[in-house]
Image: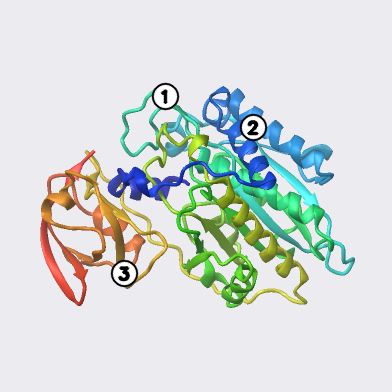
Amino acid sequence: MSTTLRTLLACTLVTLAAADLPAQQASTPRARKILDDDHYLASDALEGRFPGTPGNDSAAAYIARELRRLGLRPGGDGGTFLQHWTIGNTSGTRAAHAAGAAVVNVVGILPGADRRLAGQDIVVGAHFDHLGRGSFGDPAGDTTHQIHNGADDNASGTAAVLEVARLLKAARHRPARSIVFVLFNAEEEGALGSAFYAEHPAIPMDSTLAMVNLDMVGRMRDRRVIALGVRSATEWQALIDSANAPLHLDIRASGDGWGPSDQAAFFARKRPVIHFFTDVHEDYHRPTDDWEKINADGIADVASLAADVVQRLAARPGPLTFVDAPPPAPVAASSGARPSLGTIPDMGSEPGGVLLQGVRSGSPAEVAGIRAGDVLVGMGPHTIANLQDFQNALSSYHAGDTVEVRVRRGTQVVPITVVLGGR
């Protein structure tokens, strides 16, 4: 996941109990193939897949080989699977040491079976890049020169897209509309690859029915999946419920089409989007996000869900009913240490505030008495109804500030005075 979520989690997420995380699971041939894909992409040999590096190029080549092996049609430049572009020169890309890097997206197309609808498409996407070596984007900021393999973020989503491609290619009935599989680059620097693709699509954007994004789907716990963007079209909830009927996943659906991942570039162009996600964990943007911790059975279930949703989308006689939403307000830049509360948000619930999975040991939140199960509803003069509100509120303070934080605990709203930490 990219810059906005990185900023929020840097202020909130530090650790989850290891007992909450699944052991590696791959109990079927499908899951073992998914784990093989993840293992290669998240191996030390690829050194974290940072844009413009040999490891990133090797990941792109691997993905292109898989799409070619499946018999998909190349959707990149000059009859290849590779869409070439160059990362721009901005303050963000300079800070990440990525400005000016020559990179590729990887694009493959499964042509639609219905001649009347084959000119329309559904995009199934994931980013395949990660942080490489160094601590840019690491919440702890103390891991310079260590390899960040990104097995969940986002080798897991890449492996899931490849599995969706396998499922749809092998389906008894090929999808009526074309399916464009896009593996995006440079998401960690601000979802740059998806922005480039949206400007240079393989099939014109006004013919794109919807976009399905798979980002961080490798740590499923208790069969729980978060579906972000469900409010971007009125039909999403029914489509997801129907696709989930044989799987019995615990799906938490919420949110409009904005968010810190690749679906936002499509929502900005008035396309319905959905982002499947299995929530944050202690290894987010850390060198410890390794393939041994991946729940490949869970990825297989997410891929099955996504493939069924795509099939249903492809068979629809008409488009989805798009529901627009204003973009979130930008967070003002601040100088000095970033403020830290030390809370761990539940990304899949919107109970009129921010539900907390827990708090970091020794954090300002724990010291002040905030605890798991509390719902953040206010901070100083700010009302908190969702994660964006929380980010905006927290970013208005400085490390060391004393602030009243209001939490809903049961039926009571409890004011708690906190001295914010910093990093």
Q: Residue at x 42, y 33 (%)?
A: 288
Name the one closer to the observer, 370 or 85.
370
Viewer-nearest residue: 45 or 387: 45
Callouts 2 and 1 close, C-beta under 8 Å: no
Q: Quadrant of the C terminus?
A: top left
Looking at the image, which residue is at 40% across and 37% down? 137
On the picture, is 156 further left or further right than 72? left
Name the residue carrying label 1: 146
Q: Position of residue 93 (x, y in %)?
A: 47, 36
For residue 59, the mark is 2
Determine the residue located farthest toward the front in the rendered image: 27
Colouring mode (rainbow / by chain / secondary structure / one colour): rainbow
Sequence-wise first label, 2 or 1 = 2
- State how far apart marks 2 and 1 are (Cα): 19 Å
The residue carrying mark 3 is 385
Earlier residue among tags 2 and 3: 2
